[in-house]
Image (tube, helix red, strand yellow):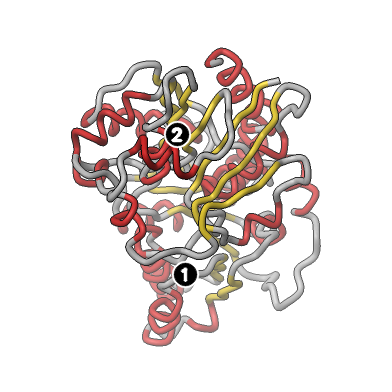
Amino acid sequence: MKKVLFIIHDLSVGGAEKVLVNLVNNMDKTKFEITVMSLFDVGVNKQFLNDDVKYISCFKYPIPGNSHYLKLLSPKQLYKWLIKDDYDIVVSYLEGPTARIVGGAPDGIKVVSWVHCTMHNKHELAMSFRNFAECTKCYQRANVMVFVSEGVRDAFQKWCKTENNIILYNTNESASMIEKSFESIDGNFPTTSFNWCSVGKLAQVKGFDRMLNIQKRLIEDGKNVHFHILGDGDEFAKLKKQCENNNITAHVTFWGYQTNPYKYVSKCDLYVCASHAEGFSTAATEALIVGTPVCTVDVSGMKEMLGYNNEYGIITENDDEKLYQAIKRLIEQPDLLEHYKKMANERGGFFSTERTVKAVEDMLILTS
């Protein structure tokens, strides 16, 4: 049995945190003894870890400016200080501070470094390191580099060349999600309008403000549409104010963070991603799994998910006007929307729990 340690910053509301929990919960415990270690003992996803996954943390609460304090120690010093047990494989499940920690692993310990975000320049890549040279050294220490999409890999390799690069798609608990998608909704969910939605942290990068602008235009065009937002974050007050200023409050519902977003997404006619950047959108994958058509701007991972010729969903240029026109077209063409609903159901099966977990298990076995 292989002892594997997964390290992550925390287990908050982000997509990477959620899919890590999905992954470790579903791995074969006869082959792997799994520990999840968070730097900070916070996050709503911690409660979803199964009992057969050991959980530990380094610090009780987040420390402001923590990445700067961690730079006071070298990667080797950090590893020796924070990693108290012996493991066959240590996995940094996010870029940043945890990649720096595993970069200090002693010889003989296998290292896997996972990258979820698209890196646009050297500064983004090296933010959690003392300098770019240290960043490169830590990532090149990894025996395997895992990327969540081709776009994330290609952007990373532009700045930092590594070997043994593979792509592994995020793990979703597909059977459980489908079951939960049939649950009823407590609250006023409109039944006579075209319902579209988006799920994610209410942060600027996710483009919720763009979608609210599109909702305003659709209403001005005479469309009977309702927009559903599932998530919480720093942009909440700003987005609510935007609704008020544009007189669309009655046509937008903020559902907040939901432990079961699938029952909302499955009852919507369309899922939309308007992000300025993504690694590989967990929420869009979940929409496919529960059979909701996806319309998205072109960010990393979407062509792998939906096809390079829009086989499984609609991909537009990352442009507000193009996205608006694509959504409007799907509203006006029910046959096209129905086609993509069928294709969503077909494509969702590709991201089954069994398939994605096995790919990770195979990687870990080969690594060891």
Residue 309 in sight? no
- Which residue lies under the disc numbered 1? 233
Residue 41: image location, x then y, percent:
57, 59
Q: Which mark is in front, 2 or 1?
A: 2
Callout 1 secondary element: loop
Q: Based on the displayed image, in which of its 4 quarters is residue 363 positioned?
A: top right
Tell me how far mark 2 sits from mark 1, CA to CA: 25 Å
At label 1, the amino acid type is: Gly
Quadrant, the N terminus: top right
| In the foreground, 195 or 124 | 124
Residue occupying image coordinates x 49% and y 21% = 110
Residue drawn at (45%, 28%) of the image? 146
Reading the image, the residue beneath label 2 is 114
Asked if residue 42 lies left or right of residue 326, the reply is right
Can you say whether 181 is above or below 248 in the image? Answer: above
State the image quarter where residue 150 is shown. top left
Residue 219 appears at what percent x and percent y?
A: 45, 74
Quarter of the view holding residue 240:
bottom left
| Residue shown at the point (78%, 46%) measured from the top left | 51
Q: Which residue sits at x=56%, y=74%?
A: 254
Say which of 69 and 152 sits in front. Answer: 69
